[in-house]
Amino acid sequence: MGAMMAIGPLSTDMYLPALPVLSHELGATMSQTQITLTATLLGMALGPLLIGPLSDARGRRGPLLIGMSCYVVLSLLCLIAHSIGLLIVLRFAQGFAASAGIVIALAIARDLYAGRALARCVSLLMMVNFLAPIVAPVLGGLLLSFTSWRGVFVSLALFGIALVLVVAFGLSETLPPARRQDGGFSASLAEFRFLLFNGRFVGCALSLGFTFTAIFVYIASSPFIFENIYGLSPQSTSLVFGVIALGIPITAQLNARLLTRISAQELLIWGASAIALGSIALIAAVITGVGLIGVLPSCFLIVTSVGLITPNATALALSKARAAGSASALLGVLQIGLAVVVAPLIGLAGSKSALPMAATIAGSGLATLLTVVVLSRSGKGN
């Protein structure tokens, strides 16, 4: 299940070091090349809308096997792409297929666990999911030392094959026929409607969306900010990224332990308070011009808070669902959708000032806290 959660960040981050070479070989501009990343994220956002309800109606193993098999084929097709336009289309389809692993892994967790046990399971899954973006660019860089960017897609195809084998021979069905959803697409629409009018679910989903937006803006903007404004070398920037990112799996592991005596809702409030505090500190550091001595600790606090927010908000949201696949799908759409809309706007502001990045992260962090506070007051019945 952890490997299925990791397929998303591996698909998006492993080939990041190859973007300049890929751009040159396919005769594309950097902005066109970056669209291949956006297309993958868009596929991951839209895929769950089909795959989640399908898994509620047909069980988990069948849709998962189909999704992972398609992922393998599409990874191999990316390998032989001869134009940037074709690669963009294939990357969208690859992200769509990859979403099967993410959405069904969370649905399986909901099938097997409830309450604090569910929150602990999701916390451990997220720890694997958070480690993947740290490891993926390093693996991509190592691959490029003896192969081309096409070799990255060979590695992704091999990873997909491994998942197909594990699911086929090592994963039993977790949703028996008696618990499956009847009624087809109309039943899925009814479930989406139920969830969108459930205050607790919407609060959790939006808190995840605002948090992911803050982190996505940080990832997309900070390399330019660190290097162009604060004078760090690319190597130093990579080191800073790695150190800051390590806070997430550490916090996720701590969260799993704390759940034995502290509720998921209380830990969610702690995480939301941390991201809001870090966001305020970041924009203050940028406005006052104190430099990296103020910026880096603020970024660390913002990123580290994800280890508390994501697993607890996800577990609380899934606990309100009648159909775990549909709920997981809606969470993915709201989470990734906000970031896909907001992040390109930061690029339009340019990289000569850190203020657009800091202001967007601050807005997202405060929105996370506000959403969680409203959520905590909505009561258990909402």
Image (cartoon, grey):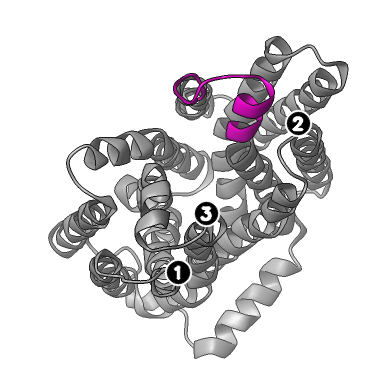
For disc 2, the marked residue is 354
On the question of residue 95 being in view, the answer is yes
What secondary structure is marked by label 1?
helix
- Left of 16 or right of it: where is 116? right
Q: Are marks 1 and 3 in contact (CB under 8 Å)?
A: no
- Give the amino acid type for the residue marked by disc 1 in the picture: Ile
Give the distance between the C-alpha atoms of the residues marked 3 and 2, in whole angstroms.
Answer: 21 Å
Of labels 1 and 3, the one closer to you: 3
Q: Main secondary structure of the magenta part?
A: helix
Give the distance between the C-alpha atoms of the residues marked 1 and 3, in whole angstroms.
Answer: 13 Å
Residue at 52% across, 60% down: 41
Q: Residues within 10 Å of mark 2 (few under 14, many from 20)?
A: many
- Magenta range is 223-237
Q: Are marks 3 and 2 in contact (CB under 8 Å)?
A: no
Which disc number belongs to residue 88? 1
For disc 3, the marked residue is 30
* Residue 289, image x, y percentages: 82, 16
Asked whether 364 falls inside the magenta stretch, the response is: no
* Residue 18, image x, y percentages: 36, 47
Closer to the chain start, of discs 3 and 2, is 3
